Image: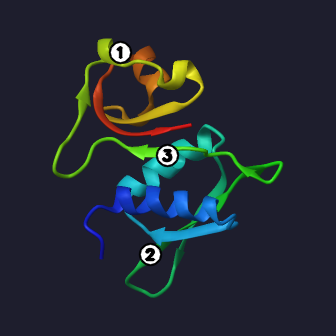
Amino acid sequence: MNRDSVASLLTNIRNAQATKKVQVVVPFSEAVCSIVRVLKREGYIKTFFVCSSSKRYLKLNILLKYMDEKPVISCINQISKPGLRIYNKHTNIKPHLNGLGITILATSKGTITDKLAKKLNVGGEVICHIS
């Protein structure tokens, strides 16, 4: 099992969209599920659902989204890593690519985008940039 499930999720999505796959199956965790919820809410993926491969292990099945045979997610970069956590105050949150992309943050209000964090005046751990 990979210790960094967020990095595994982002890499699986990046690789699947590079090869034009329709879906990605990743191991379930609360952190991964909260990131995928944000991606769904912002329109970067079609949908997702939890399925079980056995009684013990849950899997997250993610259906990817394409526009004119091009992936909706063109760039996905992990910012905060297990060895180096990156935190931002709400005053230091800048829009990613001048608002053309999103930044996902883990805050006290849950896992949210940079725009919502700025609106709620909360800072947190910067998880990734997506465009």
Q: Which residue is denoted by mark 2 in the rendering?
A: 58
**How far is disc 1 from disc 3 in space, using C-alphas?**
25 Å
Q: Is residue 71 left or right of residue 4?
A: right
The residue positioned farthest toward the bottom in the image shown: 54
Which numbered dot is residue 76?
3
Q: What residue sits 71% from the left and 53% below the top? A: 65
Q: What residue sits 47% from the left and 20% below the top? A: 95
Which numbered dot is residue 121?
1
Numbered marks: total: 3
Q: Position of residue 53 (x, y in %)?
A: 50, 84
Q: Position of residue 26 (x, y in %)?
A: 47, 69
Q: What residue sits 48% from the left and 73% below the top? A: 59
Q: Is 52 located above or below residue 37 in the figure? A: below
**How far is disc 2 from disc 3 in space, using C-alphas?**
24 Å
Give whichever of 29, 131 is nearer the camera. Answer: 131
Between discs 2 and 3, the one toward the N terminus:
2
Q: In what element is the residue under mark 2?
A: strand
Q: Is 33 located above or below residue 100 in the figure? A: below
The residue positioned farthest toward the right in the image shown: 68
Q: Is 16 located above or below residue 104 in the figure? A: below
Label 2 packing within 10 angstroms: few (<14), some (14-19), many (20+): some
Which quadrant of the view contains residue 49?
bottom right
Give whichever of 38, 130 is nearer the camera. Answer: 130
Instruction: Name which residue type carries label 2.
Output: Leu
